[in-house]
Image (spheres, coloured by chain):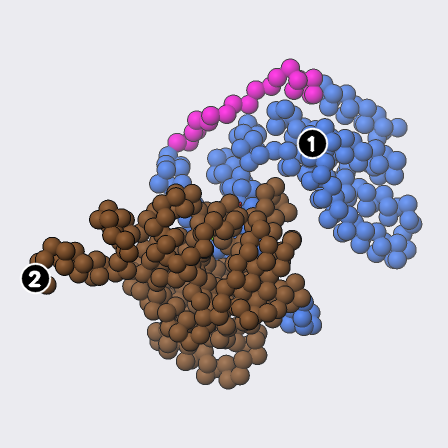
Amino acid sequence: MSAIEFDHVWYRYSSHQDYALKDVTVTIGKGEIVGVVGPNGAGKTTFAKHINGLLKPDKGLVKVLGRDTKDESVARLSRDVGIIFQNPHHQLFSETVSEEVLFGLKNFDVENPGLVAERVLEDFGLLQYREKPPLSLSGGEKKRLCIASAIAWDPKILVLDEPTVGQDLNNKRQLLDLIVSWSQRGKTAILVSHDMEFLWALNPRILVFSKGRILADGKVDVVFTDEEILHEASLRLPQLAELAAKLGWKNPPRTPSEAAKRILEVKGWPM
Amino acid sequence: MDPRCRLLIALMLFAFSLAFLDLPKVVLVLALVILAGTLSKILRRLAKLQILTGILVAFILVINITIGYSVIYSLTLSLRFLSIVSSTSVFFLTTSPDELEQVLKWLRAPRDVVFAFTTAVRFVPVLMLDLSQIIAAQRSRGLEFEKGNPITRLRKLSPILVPMIVTALLRSNDLAEAIEVRGYGVSKRPTSIYELKFSKYDWSCIVIVVLATAALTFLLIY
Ligand SMILES: Nc1ncnc2c1ncn2[C@@H]1O[C@H](COP(=O)(O)OP(=O)(O)O)[C@@H](O)[C@H]1O
Ligand SMILES: [Mg+2]
């Protein structure tokens, strides 16, 4: 059984003429990491909101862990699908950091919520702030808290909408590690992002959205080196891919050190 | 049409909605309000609003009748309420924040008041968007409004209200800084790219309004 299945999904907002999702068909397996990219208004967030049933398809079918989202409440689906939206201020409301994490745990009747919350806060390096108000944290910490409060109830699928916006290099690195270890536990992660460098480093499967349709679906090194697709989706080549293209390399390097090694080999310079 | 002209029409309809007390006249004003709505092509939005108000009105109607007022009297009262609300909406639904600003300036309102007022109007759609995103975010964390008794339901409002207030404050803070760095408050009488001008069409409108006012006043007195 796959984690997420979209079968010819169409969706239109009542205030809009045009469909925000047009005939979207895709299957995402358990344990996969998927990056969803595309220009503003392409339908990425609309796609994400279908995964926990916040939106239900006008036509077609969405199945999450084998269950038709039309038959389930948002709360029941969210038990298995943790979605974190872009703006932390849209969800932080508690008096303390630990209460913020407890909110989801209580809603989903998780056992030993106090202990679970403490462990998650420790994992996320937020334990020292547990009695502080969430709004007193820095931007990166707020984002981490939002992610922590979803991971706390241990969903099977994590959906992050624009997680790298406004995050510094360190935060991004932590996020990268977090997603990698998440998927190593056999869990599914969906990242909505147009941070090409971030996705390049993460090396996930990529879905390219454009005007409500899936334009391309494939591995990063295939999709992100296809200039035609990137142009269509107004995206820019990641720097390492661009470098590889300029040097005429077939398979682009994943990290700067890999690139450096190859360049030095060609030149025959000593390492 | 000049926004001042629209304001005048709305004021007239509003005044007579208040003034008339018997059923046929109230129905007449309500018909005029709907006519104005039709002419300004906002009928659909006006109808939406009237349905919302209608629910409240129906509620008042039921209460009035149950506590023993006559049906006619209660009906008149309800329709009056409906026409009072709709007559003001005729103005606000047809007038953009820019035009509102012009009208307020023309009325010699202080600049800060004008700015505060139009900004509040402009903020409504932005805040509505925030609200829907906040509700989506909290429902994704397992918040369910449908469950529980009235008291627990009331407590469920804080995950919505707190972020709402916080984002509104942050937005207004951002706005305050943004306008200040662009010179807000430097000039007492800032220039404007729009100027209000009465056209022939507007003058004929005024004449109609004056005639209508006379006619309705006649109705009111006799
Ligand atoms: N709440 C909404 N109401 C009406 N239209 C919306 C709403 N949210 C998004 N849209 C429209 O749907 C389309 C897709 O939006 P969205 O999924 O948010 O795109 P993305 O996340 O890729 O930027 C856009 O044209 C947008 O204007
Ligand atoms: Mg989006």
- Is residue B66 placed above or below B16 in the rendered structure? below
Asked if residue B195 is among those painted magenta in the image, a careful observer would answer yes
* Observer-nearest of A37 and B45: A37
Q: Is residue A25 visible?
A: yes
Which residue sits furthest left? Answer: A270
Mark 2 residue type: Pro
Mark 1 residue type: Lys
Asked if residue A14 is among those painted magenta in the image, a careful observer would answer no
Quadrant where the C terminus of chain A lies? bottom left
Stretch of the chain drawn in magenta:
B187-206
Residue B115 located left or right of residue A193: right
The residue mark sitting in front, 2 or 1, is 2
- Judging by colour alone, the chain drawn in brown in this rendered image is A
For the stretch drawn in magenta, what is the main secondary structure?
loop
Mark pair 2, 1: CA separation = 78 Å
**Label for residue A270?**
2
- Is residue B77 placed above or below B108 in the rendered structure? below
Residue A95 in the image, given as x and y percentages of width and height = 47, 70
Which residue was labeled with disc 1? B41
Residue A180 in the image, given as x and y percentages of width and height = 37, 69
Quadrant where the N terminus of chain A lies? bottom right
